Image: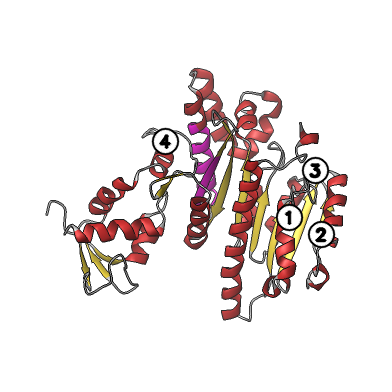
């Protein structure tokens, strides 16, 4: 199956590539703006793809690395700053990628020629990242299965300022791997030994429905990432073409709310939506899996959450959004919509009020006052 993985770009692969590329450009814009304010710092950003694959699928569609490099060559701000690092264990993939990159118009104008290498992703590479102080780096880890993917790899990059990670989580193979002693070391590296052992014990003692097993695995992966320093984590689920079962997830990990906000907006754009709320194609979930349950709440729940969580406080939209939205599937426009509705219904007070404030808007200096509980 690995030999045919790049034969054709599926709709899932297109969405995955779009999520990665959309986030990279938004992230790069934020990093460049920050570097302009602090010219004494290194004026470079990095994109690292450790399982890069070939330049194109067999049907001619550009792979994610090629999409990144095509736009980089066309953007003066990016081409003066981008340090691109690509790796794949398959020498033929590397040759293909190198050939395709060299054919991009204007690629010779990049200040830093892309680094393309062949090799396994393992402990040596993790130590290389861990021992270095990295420039702002976006790491994309997209292994065919799970070999080479570990908490230590993500942490070795995430430790430095401006560094974020997206990785491919092959749910089906990982679910099977948790019951296979032959790949025990790989599962321990992915979840941490204690957590992996707990999952094995849980699954050995109790036969779970498929959606329950998936929810436990995804919840534990998220908890592991948060414990190792990934304060903000977002999973995005992909189903098979028939929509009957999960095939894999993308996990986003960041230490900063701004990256979390950007990726949540990107995932929102590529999600199926119920009204104005996106489901992010997350797992079926209920109260047993609190992080997943929060991500699936309908918009109507946000009204009750705000009135209960913010009772007796006065705040502004931005700080409210940054503190309250963590772990929830709501984006900024959801908060704005609900807050304006609560104001119209007389359940909260804003200053200046609407009118004279334009309907549906909440400016940066507008104060929002929630009544004390029971009022």
Read off the residue under disc 4: 289
Which mark is nearer the camera, 3 or 4?
3
Residue 153 coordinates in the image, percent (x, y): 66, 49
Nearer to us in this view, 154 or 363: 363
Are discs 3 and 4 less than 8 Å apart at CB?
A: no
Q: Is residue 363 left or right of residue 261?
A: left
The answer to whether residue 81 is left or right of residue 209 is: right
Res. 10 image quadrant? top right
Q: Earlier in the sequence, mark 3 or mark 2?
A: 3
| Element class at badge 2 | helix
Question: Mark 1 Cα within 10 Å, few/some/many (few <14, many 20+)?
Answer: many
84 and 240: which is toward the camera? 240
**Disc 4 crowd, CA 10 A, few/some/many (<14, 14-19, 20+):** some
Say which mark, if any, is on residue 101: 2
Sequence order check, earlier mark of 1 and 2: 1
What separation in Å lies between label 4 and label 2 (alpha carbons)?
Answer: 44 Å
Q: Is residue 231 magenta?
A: yes
- Of pointers 3 and 4, the one earlier in the residue sequence: 3
The vertical placement of 216 against 66, above or below, is: above
Counting every numbered tag in the picture gives 4
The mark closer to the camera, 4 or 2, is 2
Which quadrant does the C terminus fall into?
Answer: bottom left
Measured from the top left, where is residue 159 in percent x and y? 60, 58
Residue labelled with disc 3: 58
Q: Nearer the viewer, mark 3 or mark 2?
A: 3
Query: Which residue is depicted at the point 60% across and 29% down?
Result: 175
Say if the magenta span includes residue 33. no
Residue range corresponding to the magenta coloring = 215-237
Q: Which residue is mark 1?
A: 65
Q: Dot 1: what SS?
A: helix
Asked if 207 appears above or below 2 in the picture, the reply is above
């Amino acid at each position: 199956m690995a030999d045919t993985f790049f034969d054709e770009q599926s709709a899932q692969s297109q969405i995955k590539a779009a999520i990665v590329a959309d986030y990279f450009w938004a992230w790069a814009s934020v990093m460049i703006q920050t570097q302009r304010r602090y010219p004494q710092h290194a004026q470079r950003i990095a994109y690292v793809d450790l399982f890069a694959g070939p330049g194109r699928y067999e049907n001619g569609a550009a792979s994610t690395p090629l999409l990144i490099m095509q736009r980089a060559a066309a953007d003066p701000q990016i081409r003066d700053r981008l340090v691109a690092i690509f790796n794949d264990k398959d020498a033929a993939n590397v040759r293909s990628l190198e050939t395709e990159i060299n054919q991009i118009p204007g690629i010779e104008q990049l200040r830093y020629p892309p680094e393309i290498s062949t090799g396994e992703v393992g402990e040596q590479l993790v130590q290389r990242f861990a021992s270095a102080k990295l420039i702002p780096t976006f790491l994309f880890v997209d292994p065919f299965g799970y070999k080479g993917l570990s908490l230590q790899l993500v942490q070795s990059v995430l430790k430095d300022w401006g560094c974020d990670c997206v990785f491919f989580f092959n749910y089906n193979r990982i679910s099977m791997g948790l019951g296979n002693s032959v790949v025990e070391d790989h599962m321990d590296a992915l979840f941490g030994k204690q957590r992996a052992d707990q999952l094995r014990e849980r699954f050995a003692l109790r036969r779970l429905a498929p959606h329950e097993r998936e929810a436990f695995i995804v919840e534990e992966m998220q908890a592991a990432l948060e414990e190792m320093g990934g304060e903000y984590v977002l999973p995005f689920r992909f189903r098979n073409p028939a929509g009957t079962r999960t095939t894999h997830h993308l996990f986003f990990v960041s230490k900063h709310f701004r990256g979390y906000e950007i990726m949540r907006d990107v995932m929102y754009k590529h999600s199926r939506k119920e009204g104005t709320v996106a489901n992010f194609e997350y797992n079926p979930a209920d109260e047993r899996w609190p992080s997943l349950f929060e991500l699936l709440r309908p918009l109507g729940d946000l009204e009750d959450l705000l009135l209960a969580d913010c009772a007796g406080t006065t705040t502004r939209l931005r700080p409210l959004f940054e503190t309250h939205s963590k772990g929830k599937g709501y984006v900024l426009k959801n908060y704005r919509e609900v807050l304006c509705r609560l104001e119209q219904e007389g359940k909260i007070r804003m200053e200046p009020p609407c009118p004279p404030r334009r309907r549906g808007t909440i400016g940066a200096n507008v104060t929002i006052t929630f009544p004390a509980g029971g009022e």
